[in-house]
Image: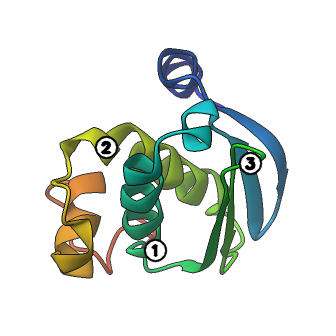
């Protein structure tokens, strides 16, 4: 995990509880009492093209993300999930009305939604 990611986690008060290739569970205390935040976060992460399933358990203040695992891209995928967490505040309240491509652009400005996993 990069130093920047560690700093962002501390600032936003979240931490990875469990991670295996294709699945990550993140504890986010804010999920307990902020349903609007939870809704925005769920929609934003669902917009990532590699994500297959998103579940928020507000009682446990956790986010579970399942994704198509591509060998060699695990860090990239998890970094995009972390960027999504950091980007939630930028979204308007009616997030479900925003196209997936536009949501993906919030997470990765300047990157085509389907090209962020290509090897350079």
Q: Which residue is mark 2?
A: 87
Corner quadrant of residue 106:
bottom left
Image quarter of the N terminus:
top right
Q: Residues within 10 Å of mark 1 (few under 14, many from 20)?
A: many
Residue 106 lies left or right of residue 47; in this view the side is left
Separation of marks 3 and 1 at Cα, in angstroms: 21 Å
> Nearer the N terminus, badge 2 or badge 1?
1
Q: Which residue is mark 1?
A: 46
Label 1 residue SS: helix
Residue in the image at 69% along x and 43% along y: 61
Q: Which residue is mark 3?
A: 59
Residue 14 lies left or right of residue 23; in this view the side is left
Label 3 residue SS: loop
Q: Position of residue 17 (x, y in %)?
A: 82, 40
Q: Is residue 57 above or below residue 95?
A: above
Q: Position of residue 6 (x, y in %)?
A: 59, 21
> Nearer the N terminus, badge 2 or badge 3?
3
Residue nearest the viewer, comparing 35 with 8: 35
Residue in the image at 45% along x and 44% along y: 85
């Amino acid at each position: 995990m990069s130093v920047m990611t560690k700093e962002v986690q501390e600032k936003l008060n979240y931490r990875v509880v469990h991670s295996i290739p294709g699945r990550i569970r993140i504890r986010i205390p804010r999920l307990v009492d902020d349903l609007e935040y939870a809704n925005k976060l769920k929609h934003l992460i669902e917009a990532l093209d590699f994500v297959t399933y998103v579940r928020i358990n507000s009682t446990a203040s956790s986010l579970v993300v399942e994704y198509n695992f591509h060998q060699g891209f695990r860090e990239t995928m998890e970094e995009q999930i972390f960027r999504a967490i950091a980007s939630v505040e930028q979204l308007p309240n009616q997030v479900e009305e925003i196209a997936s491509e536009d949501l993906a652009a919030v997470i990765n400005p300047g990157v085509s939604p389907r090209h962020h996993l290509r090897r350079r």
